[in-house]
Amino acid sequence: MPVTVIVGTQWGDEGKGKIVDLISKDMDIVARYQGGHNAGHTVIVGDMEVVLHLIPSGILHKGKKCLIGNGVVVDPKALIDEIEMLKKNGIDVDSQLFISKKAHLIMPYHKVIDLSMEAIKGGKKIGTTGRGIGPAYTDKASRLGIYISDLLNPEIFREKLAINIEQKNSLVKNLFGKEPFDIDQIFNEYIAYAEVIKKYFVDAKLFMREAILAGERILCEGAQGSMLDVDYGTYPFVTSSNTTTGGVCTGLSIPPKYIDRVLGITKAYTTRVGEGPFPTELLDETGEILRKEGGEYGATTGRPRRCGWLDMVVLKNAVWLNGLDGIVLTKLDVLDNFRTIKICEGYKYKGTIFKDMPDELEIITNGEPVYREVEGWMARSAGVTDYKDLPAKAKDYIKLIEELSATPIRIISTGKQRSETIEL
Ligand code: GDP
Ligand code: IMO
Ligand code: MG
């Protein structure tokens, strides 16, 4: 079993951090393949709660190697803050962390452009995390990006920076009416960061090749969720990377033939942060209860998450796009006190019911969810660790999800702690 992939099947925040941490005990390497510090992955062990944004969620396991792949965009300041936070918690980051030399940098101008673009879009904004993710990937695709390892060569770094500063200054001045960037200030700031992080740089394709050929067990940790994928999500209300399994190959130099298990992390209901269509969103008291019971506030930005029922159109879409071998169902306990629970089986749009994710944003935005209503269990699943101890109606809910998605549920999460888990 060399390579296992974990992806979010919804709009992010499905509980990937908890599950990656849980599975890491059986792994040698945990690696991030896309995204950046827009992610917020919560890991709770005993009294310690850690939110990881950039560093893989396997880092709390002593001796496990954690790789930030070339597909990730790295803000070195955010990275250093996270390293310091982990070191304060007694984690031996220096022996565990590795960063691809070909990861691209997030620069101060990326953040300014991200926030300014959102501001000028006004009512049409995406609701980004404001971390500069989109503009950093834009530069990568438009061949203006700067590798993290360019910091090791001040001449090359300055040359690339100069081209960017000239272009970005014209943009911020003319489009946003903002102050221009000072090349010396950014140059000096980033060269100083390099001193702290250069010890982690590796040739990640060799790192991966050696690990895979040596039979090491690798866990790839997706960030965001399948509905935020730049190709398959609710574009343009998406993030700027391939969050689905395909991103693993390009973001970590893992050839597809080595991927042999893909698990889709699925919340027992649905949440979304930021703007964009969300067919099963509940704008009523039930949505409020889900938010309160589930503690649905962003781990990165603190924004209240939008909440709604489980959407099988979304889940079935993720099953195919990612090639899911199994589902990990999280936050089942949050539904413990609901008399009735709904599952969306399709979107009704102009008389037609769409059971598969439509390509048209218009249908996703204005389609009416078609629900199947089931009885809630009104009993404790919270903290249950053995399948047989689950309330009967909770088991029915689990079986229904398996049946409708045609995919087995492998793990059920019944609480925040590592131990509050049922492994099937
Ligand atoms: P991620 O981005 O997918 O890693 O998810 P987040 O960490 O952003 O959000 C998931 C939240 O739910 C975190 O606060 C977790 O501690 C919490 N959580 C994870 N699994 C469970 C669960 O089974 N039950 C409950 N009640 N909370 C959970
Ligand atoms: P994890 O890994 C939930 C959302 C933002 C916004 C859109 C684009 O914790 O699940 P970006 O800053 O990426 O350009 O924002 O994507 N978003 C997330 N939503 N969880 C995340 O990560 C997210 N990362 C980005 O809210 O709607
Ligand atoms: Mg999160």
Image (cartoon, helix red, strand yellow):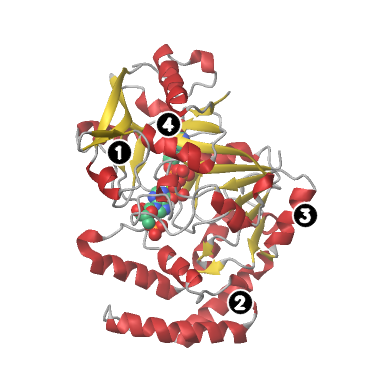
Q: Quick one: label 2 or label 4, which is nearer the N terminus?
A: 2
Q: Quick one: label 1 or label 3, which is nearer the N terminus?
A: 3
Label 1 element class: strand
Q: Which mark is residue 382?
A: none
Single out the mark in the foreground, 2 or 4.
2
Q: Which mark is residue 150?
A: 2
Seen from the viewer's position, the closer of residues 407 and 150 is 407
Q: Can you tell which quarter of the image residue 175 is in?
A: bottom left
Label count reads: 4
- Residue flagged by tag 1: what amino acid is it? Cys
Residue density around tag 4, few if under 14, some if 14–19, many if 20 or more, within 10 Å? many
Seen from the viewer's position, the closer of residues 43 and 115 is 115
Side of 17 relative to 355 (left or right): right
- Residue flagged by tag 4: what amino acid is it? Lys
- Residue flagged by tag 3: what amino acid is it? Glu
Seen from the viewer's position, the closer of residues 339 and 241 is 241
Cα distance in 3D space between marks 3 and 2: 24 Å
Residue density around tag 2, few if under 14, some if 14–19, many if 20 or more, within 10 Å? some
Location of residue 185 in the rendering, given as x and y in whole percent from the top left corner? 47, 84
Callouts 1 and 3 close, C-beta under 8 Å:
no
* Residue bearing mark 1: 307
Cα distance in 3D space between marks 2 and 1: 42 Å
* Residue bearing mark 4: 331
Q: Residue at x 44, y 46 (%)?
A: 226
Q: Quick check: 273 above or below 111?
A: above
Callouts 2 and 4 close, C-beta under 8 Å:
no
Ligand 1 under 8 Å from disc 4 Cβ: yes
* Residue bearing mark 3: 210
